[in-house]
Amino acid sequence: MKLETERLIIRPIALGDKNEIFEYRSNSESNKYQEWIPKTIEEVETFIGKISKQINEPETWFQFVIVEKEKQVIVGDLGIHFFDSENKQVEIGFTLNQAYQKRGFAIESVKGVIDYLFKDLNKHRIITSIDPDNQNSIRLVERIGFRKEAHFVKSLLINGEWVDDVIYAILEKDWENLKSC
């Protein structure tokens, strides 16, 4: 299964992607808002091995890589957490290689996955969890149409530090209304 947008292919992660993923995910400065910053290729292999091989399985994470069509390079990844036991709500998270930021790849890939989740998988609600200091991600999800629903103070332990967490969400009906405008 793969999704395509104008400039991107969004496909399931594979073990063969480990070197490209390690290259951008191991950069602790550009990924300072991420919970997972691998220190070795083996950590990436373990990460890939733990991810669900089936999409849309309750209580699992499914991971895509974002591939730029023209150069056939991985520019980032996007995870989907199927956390709802009734399987109508999901959480998404995304990481873009710093070398490919500010080109519209993040917004293009997130929109493509949102379309897929609402149209093909019949989801009702999509949420995302963002560090309130991560203004780039906040601007991105707000541009897409997500609304801020909550701000939790010192609620996540990331890299040994308690940090705040802001939750944004979008409903399927709101997505459809935005697309028709």
Image (spheres, rainbow, N blue to C red):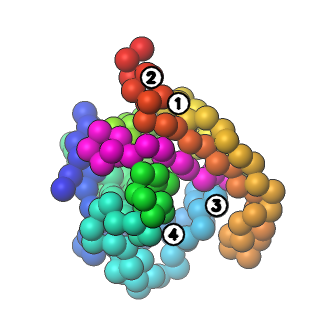
Marks 2 and 1 in Cβ contact (< 8 Å): yes
Look at the image and tell me in which quarter the C terminus lies. Answer: top left
Q: CA distance from mark 2 to mark 4?
A: 36 Å
* Image vertical order of residue 52 relative to residue 174, above or below: below
N-terminal of the pair, mark 3 or mark 4, is 4
Circle 2: residue type:
Leu
Q: Give the extent of the magenta segment.
A: 116-131
- Residue of label 4: 26
* Image vertical order of residue 3 relative to residue 1, above or below: above
Marks 2 and 4 in Cβ contact (< 8 Å): no
Circle 4: residue type:
Ser
Task: Select label 3 or label 2 by which is in front.
Answer: 2
- Residue of label 3: 32
Marks 3 and 2 in Cβ contact (< 8 Å): no
For residue 145, which numbered disc appears in the image? 1
N-terminal of the pair, mark 2 or mark 1, is 1
Q: CA distance from mark 3 to mark 2?
A: 31 Å
Look at the image and tell me in which quarter the N terminus lies. Answer: bottom left
N-terminal of the pair, mark 1 or mark 4, is 4
Task: Select label 3 or label 1 by which is in front.
Answer: 1
Work out whether residue 26 or residue 150 is closer to the camera in this orientation and state it. Answer: 150
Q: CA distance from mark 3 to mark 1?
A: 25 Å
Mark 1: few/some/many CA within 10 Å (<14, 14-19, 20+): some
